[in-house]
Image: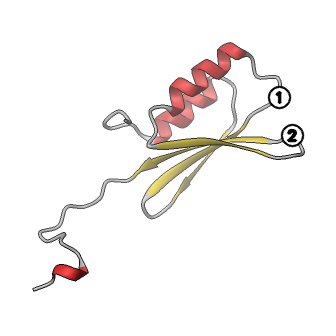
Amino acid sequence: MPAPGVSAEALAARLAAVGLATRVEEHPRHTSIEAEVPESLPTETWQEVLQVVAAADRFGLLATSLGGRTLWAAVNKAVPATGDVRGLGHQR
């Protein structure tokens, strides 16, 4: 479970601190962070990277047959509270 108040910018800064160039993109319900991962990333750095992305709501690694690897993480945006969230099947 992600830490309360974790921000995409903080995750991106932590990934940059270990030497990964990051991209941050805003989406309607989440903010995504992506970073290209070099083949030569040391084991200790991988461990630190995994600790960073574990704070996100979702994360993963895309690997291509050409050897490219893109790490991604997503941080959900707060959903505004509404007075009635019963859905379409329960309208008055």
In the displayed structure image, the side of residue 18 where residue 56 appears, left or right: left
Expressed as whole percent of the image width and height from the top left, the position of residue 47 reads: 61, 19
Label 2's element?
Answer: loop
Q: Quadrant of residue 86?
A: bottom left
Asked if disc 2 and disc 1 are in contact, CB closer than 8 Å, the reply is yes
> Which residue sits furthest bottom?
92
Label 1's element?
Answer: loop
Residue holding disc 2:
67
Expressed as whole percent of the image width and height from the top left, the position of residue 44 reads: 66, 13
In the displayed structure image, the side of residue 90 where residue 53 appears, left or right: right
Which class describes the residues within 10 Å of circle 2: few (<14), some (14-19), or many (20+)?
A: few
Residue at screen point 60% across, 30% down: 15
Q: Quadrant of the C terminus?
A: bottom left
Residue holding disc 1:
39
Residue at screen point 38% across, 53% down: 77
- 88 versus 30 height, above or below: below
Residue at screen point 82% across, 46% down: 64
- Amino acid residing under circle 1: Glu
